Image (tube, rainbow, N blue to C red):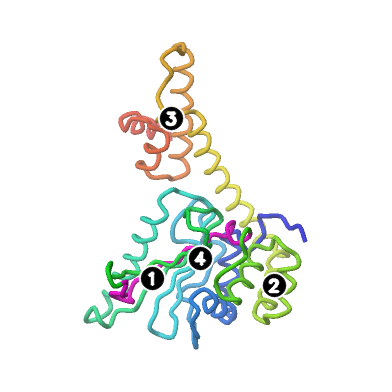
């Protein structure tokens, strides 16, 4: 039962390969039915993953799956490996981009597709005990939904593994398979849901593809390196302030470590704002570091 985390369905690259492949629309449809708790007749994936075109260091837009549901709803679903501490803002920004893109091809606002974004998180960000958070625009007093055009979902996988309660039965079955942590839960899900059984067969095939395994490993390695840099910056104490009693040599050492981490983040393509926020490096110094790349 113990599989290498790199090749589990929680790997963002494996997740996309599994659910966006042509011929696998039925398993994506079943997963979306479990998440959205609606009956879906048709799912059309807007783009398929192309192995050779994926940039390992690209953080946005390469491992998400865009689909049209029943010709009237745009859905974007993505496995999120790392916590960038701006998930809510990032989700709203991405939702706005999808909605605007749809609007450009239509004559008026009413005809524009409903847009749903779904984030499967390998970390927790909410204090609420429920693992599935759904966001909509509502009127404050009556709690009435003002528009159905906006809908955002956050599914916290660690919280699901602790609670295993709430949500539809179909969703819980899919999450058992995607997390692939509990043998009994996975076996039951595969036995009771034919689409999950198909997904497991597809996953076994992917695990046997050396090129896919290599890409999955590289994606995971890059993501973990990114997280290590973030944690390293925190442990170094940036933004907290220097202890006045420390020696100048200690201060210099921290400055050098700050620059080293910032330089590595630049090489990995992170935005200036994120680097400055994490390392507390001055913008002028960051500009000078860019000259070393």
Look at 69% across and 72% down and name the residue there: 200
Mark 4 highlights which residue? 132
Q: Residue 15, relative to residue 290: is it above or below?
A: below
Disc 2 on helix, strand or loop? Answer: helix
Q: Does the magenta segment cover residue 145?
A: yes
Magenta residues, as a range?
143-161
Percent from the top left, x then y, of residue 213? 67, 58
User: In the depicted view, which residue is nearer to us: 31 or 256?
Assistant: 31
Look at 38% across and 35% down and name the residue there: 290
Q: Residue 271, relative to residue 31: is it above or below?
A: above
Task: Decide which of tag 2 and tag 1 comes sooner along the chain.
Answer: 1
Q: Which quarter of the rendering shows the C terminus?
A: top left
Tag 2 and tag 3, C-beta contact below 8 Å: no
Percent from the top left, x then y, of residue 129? 52, 59
Mark 2 highlights which residue? 200
Mark 3 highlights which residue? 238
CA gap between label 4 and label 1 equals 13 Å
Disc ID at residue 151: 1
Q: Dot 4, crowdedness within 10 Å: few (<14), some or many (≥20)? A: many
Disc 4 on helix, strand or loop? Answer: strand
Task: Decide which of tag 1 and tag 3 comes sooner along the chain.
Answer: 1
For the residues carrying marks 4 and 1, which lies nearer the camera in this image?
4
CA gap between label 1 and label 3 equals 36 Å
Q: Residue 159, relative to residue 227: is it above or below?
A: below
Task: Decide which of tag 2 and tag 3 comes sooner along the chain.
Answer: 2
Q: Is residue 20 left or right of residue 272?
A: right
Q: Does the magenta segment cover residue 138?
A: no
């Amino acid at each position: 039962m113990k599989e290498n985390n790199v090749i589990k369905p929680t790997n963002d690259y494996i997740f996309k390969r599994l659910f966006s492949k042509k011929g696998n629309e039925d398993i994506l449809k079943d997963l979306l039915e479990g998440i959205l708790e609606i009956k879906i007749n048709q799912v059309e994936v807007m783009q398929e993953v192309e192995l050779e075109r994926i940039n390992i260091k690209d953080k946005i837009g390469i491992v998400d799956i865009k689909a049209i549901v029943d010709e009237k709803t745009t859905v974007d679903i993505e496995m999120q490996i790392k916590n960038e501490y701006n998930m809510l803002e990032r989700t709203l920004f991405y939702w706005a981009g999808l909605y605007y893109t749809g609007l450009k091809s239509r004559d008026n606002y009413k005809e524009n597709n409903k847009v749903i974004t779904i984030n499967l998180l390998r970390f927790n960000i909410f204090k609420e005990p429920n693992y599935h958070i759904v966001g909509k625009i509502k009127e404050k007093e009556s709690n009435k939904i003002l528009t159905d055009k906006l809908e955002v979902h956050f599914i916290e996988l660690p919280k699901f593994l602790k609670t295993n309660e709430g949500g539809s039965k179909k969703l819980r079955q899919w999450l058992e398979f995607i997390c692939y942590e509990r043998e009994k839960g996975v076996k039951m899900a595969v036995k009771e849901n034919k689409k999950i059984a198909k997904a497991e067969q597809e996953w076994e095939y992917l695990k046997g593809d050396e090129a896919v395994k290599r890409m999955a490993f590289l994606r995971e390695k890059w993501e973990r390196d990114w997280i290590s840099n973030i944690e390293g910056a925190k442990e170094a104490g940036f933004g907290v302030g220097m202890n006045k009693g420390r020696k100048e040599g200690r201060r210099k050492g921290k400055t050098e470590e700050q620059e080293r981490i910032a330089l590595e983040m630049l090489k990995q393509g992170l935005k200036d704002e994120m680097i400055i926020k994490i390392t507390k490096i001055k913008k002028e110094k960051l500009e000078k570091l860019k000259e070393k790349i």
